Image (cartoon, rainbow, N blue to C red):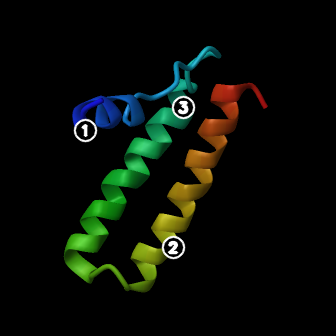
Amino acid sequence: MTASYFTNTCNKKPPVTKAKVSNELSDMIEQLRAQLVHAAEHNGFCSDIVIELSQRLDTYIVMAQHEMVGQ
């Protein structure tokens, strides 16, 4: 087997069988992601605002993951 076989096999994502993430949650994630990128560009990765936004974004991503698996 070739290296590309393993790369292609390992990079495949499992199909999501449950409903997609709600529009409201998806919009919040995208909004926080944009704010995080902007804050990191202007304040550096270690600034308090970047850390706070990153933690908030993590929370919403976990919520979305739970929604996708039906928890």
Query: x, y percentage for residue 32?
Result: 42, 53
Q: Nearer the viewer, mark 2 or mark 3?
A: 2
Instruction: From this view, report whether residue 23 is shown above or below residue 48.
Output: above
Judged from the image, the secondary structure of the residue bearing numbered disc 1 is helix
N-terminal-most mark, 2 or 3? 3
Q: Nearer the viewer, residue 18 or 59?
A: 18
Residue sitting at 31 percent across and 53 percent down? Answer: 34
Circle 3 SS class: helix
Q: Is residue 40 above or below residue 32?
A: below
Residue position marked by numbered label 1 in the rendering: 3
Q: Amino acid at mark 1?
A: Ala
Instruction: Name the residue type under label 2.
Output: Glu
In the picture provided, is 1 more to the left or to the right than 22? Answer: left
Residue 36 against residue 25 in the figure, above or below: below
Q: In what element is the residue under mark 2?
A: helix
Q: Which residue is mark 3?
A: 24
Q: Is residue 36 left or right of residue 18?
A: left
Task: Point out the frontmost of discs 3 and 1.
Answer: 1
For the residues labelled 2 and 3, the Cα–Cα distance comes to 21 Å
Q: Which residue does the numbered mark 2 point to in the structure image?
A: 52
Label 1: how many Cα within 10 Å (few below 14, some 14–19, many 20+) = few
Tell whether 65 sits left or right of 54.
Answer: right
Which residue is nearer to you in this view: 60 or 17? 17
Q: Gap in Å between the C-alphas at discs 3 and 1?
A: 41 Å
